[in-house]
């Protein structure tokens, strides 16, 4: 019997529109739990997640039936609606996102990186972090269009 199998890990990062610090300590656990649930409903396993006030890091698997763009779009639309339902009427995610592949051998390192976001951002802004990731992964990007 033929099977199609895959195990693809992604580190997905996206921010609030204009990097506004709208994810409060009250909203954070609700948002994280909601994204985990959304992912599970799409056959995505969440390895780690951390919602900062202005951006989110999500380490997860990519199901073989979804593209990265479809996954991110579904999660951003639904989670934005959820946050709006909590009373944050002007909440929007940025239009773009970044997704980086993660090898099985690096999972622990990326998990730890995501878990240490609070400490990490005492030393580096989100913009600095994001550009560093783009450069480390040798991604071509136009600085004019990275931020919205």
Image (cartoon, rainbow, N blue to C red):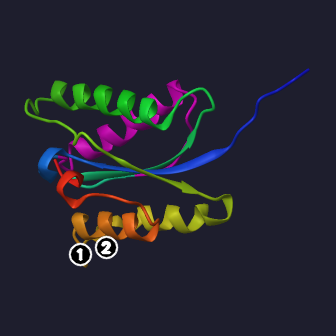
Q: Are marks 1 and 2 in contact (CB under 8 Å)?
A: yes
Q: Residue at x 26, y 55 (%)?
A: 52
Q: In the rendered view, would you say 137 is above or below 147?
A: below
The x, y position of residue 144, in whole percent, is 17, 56
The x, y position of residue 129, in whole percent, is 31, 68
Considering every residue shown, the one lying at the far bottom of the view is 123
Q: Quadrant of residue 146?
A: bottom left
The N terminus: image quadrant: top right
Q: Secondary structure at mark 2?
A: helix
Closer to us: 42 or 65: 65
**Real-space Cα distance between discs 1 and 2?**
5 Å
Q: Which residue is mark 2?
A: 119
The x, y position of residue 54, in whole percent, is 20, 53
Q: Which residues are the magenta region?
A: 23-49
Q: In the rendered view, would you say 44 is above or below 8?
A: above
Q: Which residue is mark 1?
A: 122
All told, the count of numbered labels is 2
Q: In the rendered view, would you say 65 is above or below 58?
A: above
The x, y position of residue 36, in whole percent, is 45, 37
Q: Residue at x 32, y 58 (%)?
A: 141
Q: Is residue 59 left or right of residue 65?
A: left
């Amino acid at each position: 019997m033929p099977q199609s199998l895959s195990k693809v890990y992604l580190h997905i990062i996206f921010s609030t529109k204009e990097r506004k610090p709208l994810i409060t300590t009250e909203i954070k656990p609700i948002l994280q739990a909601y994204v985990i649930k959304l992912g599970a409903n799409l056959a995505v396993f969440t390895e780690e997640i951390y919602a900062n006030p202005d951006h989110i890091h999500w380490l997860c698997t990519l199901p073989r039936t979804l593209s990265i763009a479809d996954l991110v779009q579904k999660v951003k639309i639904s989670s934005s609606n959820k946050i709006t339902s909590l009373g944050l009427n002007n909440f929007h995610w940025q239009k773009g996102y970044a997704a980086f592949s993660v090898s099985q051998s690096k999972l622990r390192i990326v998990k730890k990186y995501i878990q240490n976001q609070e400490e990490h951002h005492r030393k580096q802004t989100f913009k600095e972090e994001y550009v560093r990731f783009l450069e480390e992964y040798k991604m071509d990007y136009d600085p004019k269009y990275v931020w919205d």
